[in-house]
Image: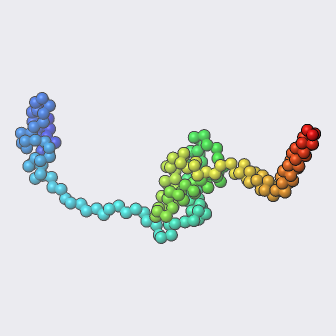
Amino acid sequence: MDADCSCCGDVFQSENEEIDCLSCGDCSGTCSKSSESVMELPIDLPPPTPMIVNDSSCYSFPELESKLFEGENGKKTLARIITRMRVEGYDEDAWKVIIGLSAFAYKNYNCKNISIQEQLRMLESAPLREITQYIPGDIDGLVNTVIRSENTFSTPHKTDKDAYKIMALGLTALVFSYVSRR
């Protein structure tokens, strides 16, 4: 069976699928012909540098929210993520998604010298199950619960009066049962 030597390029006969080139003795890249014809030049490439932003890459939560979604790219990213969420079955208001994305970016990307554009790209590829953990839940229900609890704490004297009435009735029943036994 004819075969080509990958080392020196000569054609030779191979038996039992063993590859032994007669010109160079083997095909493991140690061929004298190949070392003469191929000269490796050392290439000194500088290491890739990450995109470094100025020292003000640490933003407060509201600043990060406005930086992420103020431009055209931010609006497009938001639209893509909301569409992706709707396709996956999530039905959240846009303002909740903005807060959730801002919180996710704040926790994972803030103060790490990552540009806003890069953060937007990373948000687009982030898993939805991780993003949805930062989306606020039922705000209306929470507000109603807080309002109800404030109303309960604002009238403590009413519950105290009820407790005194119950104790008075209990004592009256006790006294009546004691008196009636004699």
In this view, the residue in front, 14 or 163, is 163
In this view, the residue in front, 141 or 52, is 141
In this view, the residue in front, 143 or 172, is 172
Image point 12% across, 45% down: which residue? Answer: 8
The total number of labels drawn is: 0
Tell me if residue 2 comes above or below residue 116 in the rendering: above
Considering the image in quadrants, where does the N terminus appear?
top left
Q: Which percent across, then down, holds residue 91?
A: 64, 44
Coloured how? rainbow
Left/right of residue 137 with respect to residue 120 in the rendered view: right
Image point 32% across, 62% down: which residue? Answer: 47
The answer to which quarter of the image holds residue 51 is bottom left
Tell me if residue 7 comes above or below residue 16 in the rendering: below
Left/right of residue 140 with respect to residue 182 in the rendered view: left
Left/right of residue 146 with respect to residue 164 in the rendered view: left
Q: Residue furthest bottom?
A: 55
Can residue 80 be seen here? The reply is no
Can residue 109 be seen here? The reply is yes
Image point 55% across, 66% down: which residue? Answer: 59
Image point 9% across, 39% down: which residue? Answer: 21
Tell me if residue 5 comes above or below residue 167 in the rendering: above
Q: Which percent across, then down, holds residue 92?
A: 64, 47
Considering the image in quadrants, where does the C terminus appear?
top right
Q: Which percent across, then down, holds residue 128?
A: 54, 46
Q: Which percent across, then down, holds residue 6?
A: 16, 42
Left/right of residue 182 with respect to residue 129 in the rendered view: right
Q: Residue furthest front?
A: 182
In this view, the residue in front, 141 or 69, is 141
